Image (cartoon, grey):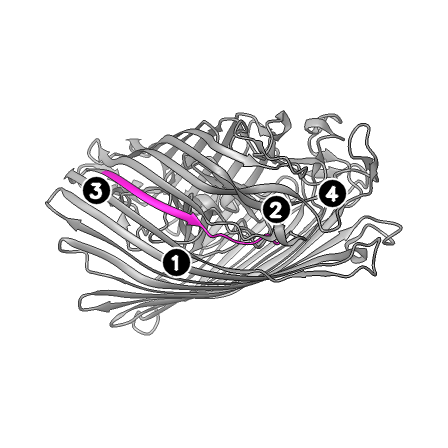
């Protein structure tokens, strides 16, 4: 096996090493950050590219395993729904699983928007690469791209027939298999298919001291079929997928009962009277097609997607009734279920011209429709129900929302000389939302009438981008851009009073970014650096408002203020010696509220809260990885070690109490892989979180402050065979 056939895992990509007659260099990385395929060094956008092998192999399962790799990016999961995304880009985070709440960071799969943050942390298979675009992407990517865009790009079916399998086993009962079968090129090379199925089992590392049961027992499943067709005038693909998982036991540690998770000496030992569960799934299909015209390309992208999420959790984090405060009254156990169903369809028709000439143009239209319904199920135990189980819970609220969105967009680049190009783009989005909210009577008053609210509203959202590029030679590009993004306005799915429903206004972001990209050392080093300043206006966050019953308050979203964030980013990949690659990334953020005026307690008093630290915004983050490949007789040994550091940050955003903060943390991961044979068979031994750092992942207020901690150190082994 030559050095040129070894795929090395790196920070920004799995680097292919190109071998020439006299030298060894880095191969180019292709991205679709501007809706067309381009070399990443020619794209005037801050984008990190992570190849799929880094997401799927050496103990990794989903995008949360990439957390800490891209600068100023946090990729966590949601505390109450672990396959939901708790993502932040450049200090803008979002973790609300209310289905009425749109994301601040857009998630796309093969260019199709994944409208909800529920489900974006499923186990992934057949991913070619993940592109993380930092900063507003409102012109080409539209709604929900206020902070940035994360795009999964799936793997094409191969030209050659074959079967491959990957089997993993590790601590805490982890077991995983991935089986892929490919037909290769058929019908004179016109048709190729790829079918992949995976399953992962995990016995959980958290124990419920009350029942002795393990929490977080996982069964995850993923099946994908891809059919690629190459015709005389274009290419098309059909992707069909079905994803699902079940989890028994959802463990949240109460700050009052178990401060910082350590009062009993073990963050993985908690004490709750109802373990809870999650049962969720997604299914759908995507059609991708590109037709070669005489004067450019016409692309069509269509998708139909359905998802279901049923989650039941102990939100008080206690065993039995406990006082609400040291001198307060006792509160019944509080166990809440979320039953969410979602359907969406999207259609994009896009044109882009040939690459030659002075003009580069991308333009098109985008249609989106979504239907969502959500039910709340509450169980406080006897005397209102026989047990604390979900089957004895009482439905307390229903909510439905229909969304229709239409957008037209375009972005052009014009070369005014051989070295200077101008960029101009715009997008106009019209969006309509209508909702129905039904608040059912409480268990204590079953004969009370239900309340019903039916709000509707529409929004028109323009976004734009301006920029200039300067390429003095083939190895370096400088750029300066100004761009905008937005998150749609909307309603509150948890509201019980008309004044709490909304609508609230859309959020907007405006960014100025200057950057440089290039290669040096005869293309043995690739680098990208950027500085940015972003203003966010009409920022939407959670506030407290009185409920329809007049008892207590409810958490709803509203426009609460504005913030400014500036920072720096740097990424590099260096082929230091044949077979030895060093990757480095650095992120710096300075984030603060310009104003944050809101009632956070529901007492009717509006206060200035601008002293609170911004959610998910560590000041510094760094990533370093070293990969070394050693040639043996007809085989290769690959050694990999990476360290990811994130400074301390607030995981809640509405308090500066210590227990809402994740401390500064460095995580170390490593693997040793032996690759043999012409087919690239391999066996790996890997370790995740080698220093066994278990700190707070996220802390929020449910009924009490509750928190969750990082997973402990885990070792495993993985075998990959190709036939």
Residue 481 on the magenta segment? yes
Q: Point out the tag, 1 or 2, that comes first from the N-terminus.
A: 1
Q: Which residue is mark 1?
A: 429
In the picture, residue 493 is in which quadrant?
bottom right
Q: Point out the tag, 1 or 3, that comes first from the N-terminus.
A: 1
Determine which of the numbered discs, if any, sits on residue 552 in the image.
Answer: 4
Residue 186 x %, y %:
35, 71
Crowding at dot 1, Cα within 10 Å, few <14 / some 14-19 / many 20+, comes out as many
Q: Is residue 99 left or right of residue 289?
A: right
Q: Are marks 3 and 4 in contact (CB under 8 Å)?
A: no
Crowding at dot 2, Cα within 10 Å, few <14 / some 14-19 / many 20+, comes out as many
**Closer to the observer: label 3 or label 2?**
2
Crowding at dot 4, Cα within 10 Å, few <14 / some 14-19 / many 20+, comes out as few
Residue 578 on the magenta segment? no
In the rendered image, is residue 615 in sight? Answer: no
Residue 680 x %, y %:
40, 49
> Spatial distance from mark 1 to mark 4, Cα to Cα?
38 Å
**Callout 4: SS:** loop
**Callout 1: SS:** strand
In the picture, residue 650 is in which quadrant?
top right
**Callout 2: SS:** strand
The magenta segment is 479-493
> Spatial distance from mark 1 to mark 3, Cα to Cα?
25 Å
Residue 147 x %, y %:
42, 43
């Amino acid at each position: 096996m030559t050095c040129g056939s070894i795929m090395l895992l790196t920070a920004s990509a799995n680097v292919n090493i190109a071998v020439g007659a006299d030298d060894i260099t880095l191969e180019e990385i292709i991205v679709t950050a501007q809706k067309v395929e381009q070399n990443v060094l020619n794209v005037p956008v801050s984008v990190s590219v992570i190849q799929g092998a880094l997401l799927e192999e050496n103990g990794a399962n989903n995008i949360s395993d990439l957390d800490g790799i891209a600068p100023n990016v946090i990729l966590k999961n949601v505390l109450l729904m672990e396959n939901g995304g708790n993502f932040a880009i450049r200090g803008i985070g979002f973790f609300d699983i209310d289905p009425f709440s749109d994301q601040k960071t857009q998630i796309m799969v093969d260019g199709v928007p994944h409208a909800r943050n529920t489900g974006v942390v499923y186990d992934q298979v057949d991913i070619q690469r993940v592109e993380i675009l930092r900063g507003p992407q409102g012109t080409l990517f539209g709604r929900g791209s206020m902070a940035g865009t994360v795009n999964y790009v799936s793997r094409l079916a191969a030209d050659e027939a074959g079967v491959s399998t990957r089997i993993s086993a590790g601590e805490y009962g982890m077991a995983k298999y991935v089986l892929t079968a490919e037909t290769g090129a058929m019908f004179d090379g016109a048709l190729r298919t790829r079918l992949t199925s995976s399953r992962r089992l995990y016995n959980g590392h958290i124990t419920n001291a009350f029942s002795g049961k393990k929490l977080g027992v996982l069964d995850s499943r993923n099946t994908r079929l891809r059919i690629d067709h190459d015709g005389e005038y274009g290419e098309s693909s059909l992707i069909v997928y079905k994803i699902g998982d079940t989890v028994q036991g959802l463990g949240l540690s109460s700050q009052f009962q178990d401060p910082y998770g350590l009062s009993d000496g073990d963050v993985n030992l908690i004490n709750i009277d109802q373990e809870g569960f999650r049962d969720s799934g997604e299914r759908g299909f995507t059609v991708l097609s590109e037709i070669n015209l005489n004067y450019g390309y016409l692309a069509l992208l269509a998708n139909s997607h359905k998802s279901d999420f049923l989650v039941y959790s102990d939100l008080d984090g206690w065993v039995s009734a406990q006082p609400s405060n040291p001198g307060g009254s006792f509160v019944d156990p509080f166990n809440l279920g979320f039953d969410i169903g979602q359907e969406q369809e999207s259609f994009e028709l896009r044109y882009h011209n040939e690459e030659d000439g002075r003009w580069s143009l991308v333009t098109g239209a985008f249609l989106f429709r979504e239907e969502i319904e959500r039910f709340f199920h509450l169980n406080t135990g006897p005397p209102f129900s026989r047990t604390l189980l979900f089957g004895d819970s009482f439905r307390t609220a229903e909510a439905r929302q229909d969304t229709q969105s239409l957008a037209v967009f375009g972005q052009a680049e014009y070369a005014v000389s051989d070295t200077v190009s101008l960029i101009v783009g715009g997008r106009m989005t019209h969006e309509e939302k209508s909702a129905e909210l039904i608040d059912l009577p409480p268990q204590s008053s079953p004969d009370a009438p239900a309340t019903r609210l039916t709000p509707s509203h529409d929004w028109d959202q323009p976004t734009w981008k301006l920029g200039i590029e300067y390429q003095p030679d083939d190895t370096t590009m400088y750029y300066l851009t100004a761009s905008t993004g937005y998150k749609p306005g909307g309603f509150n799915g948890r509201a019980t009073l008309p004044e709490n429903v909304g609508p609230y206004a859309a959020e907007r972001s405006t960014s100025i970014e200057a950057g440089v990209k290039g290669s040096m050392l005869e293309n043995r080093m690739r680098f990208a650096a950027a500085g940015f300043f972003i203003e966010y206006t009409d920022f939407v966050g959670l506030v407290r408002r009185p409920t329809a019953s007049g008892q207590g308050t409810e958490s709803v979203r509203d426009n609460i203020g504005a913030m400014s964030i500036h920072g720096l980013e740097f990424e590099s990949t260096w082929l230091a010696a044949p077979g030895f690659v060093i990757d480095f990334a650095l992120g710096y953020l300075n984030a603060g509220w310009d104003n944050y005026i809101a009632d956070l307690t529901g007492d009717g008093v509006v206060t200035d809260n601008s002293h609170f630290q911004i959610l998910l915004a560590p000041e510094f983050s760094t990533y370093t990885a070293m990969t070394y490949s050693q040639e043996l007789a007809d085989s290769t040994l690959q050694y990999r070690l990476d360290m990811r550091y994130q400074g301390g940050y607030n995981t809640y955003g509405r308090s500066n109490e210590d227990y809402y903060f994740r401390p500064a943390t460095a995580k170390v991961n490593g693997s040793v892989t032996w690759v043999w044979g012409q087919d690239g068979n391999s066996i790996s031994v890997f370790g995740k979180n080698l220093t066994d750092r278990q700190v707070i992942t996220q802390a929020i207020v449910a009924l009490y402050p509750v928190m969750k901690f990082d997973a402990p150190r885990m070792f495993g082994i993985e075998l990959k065979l190709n036939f």
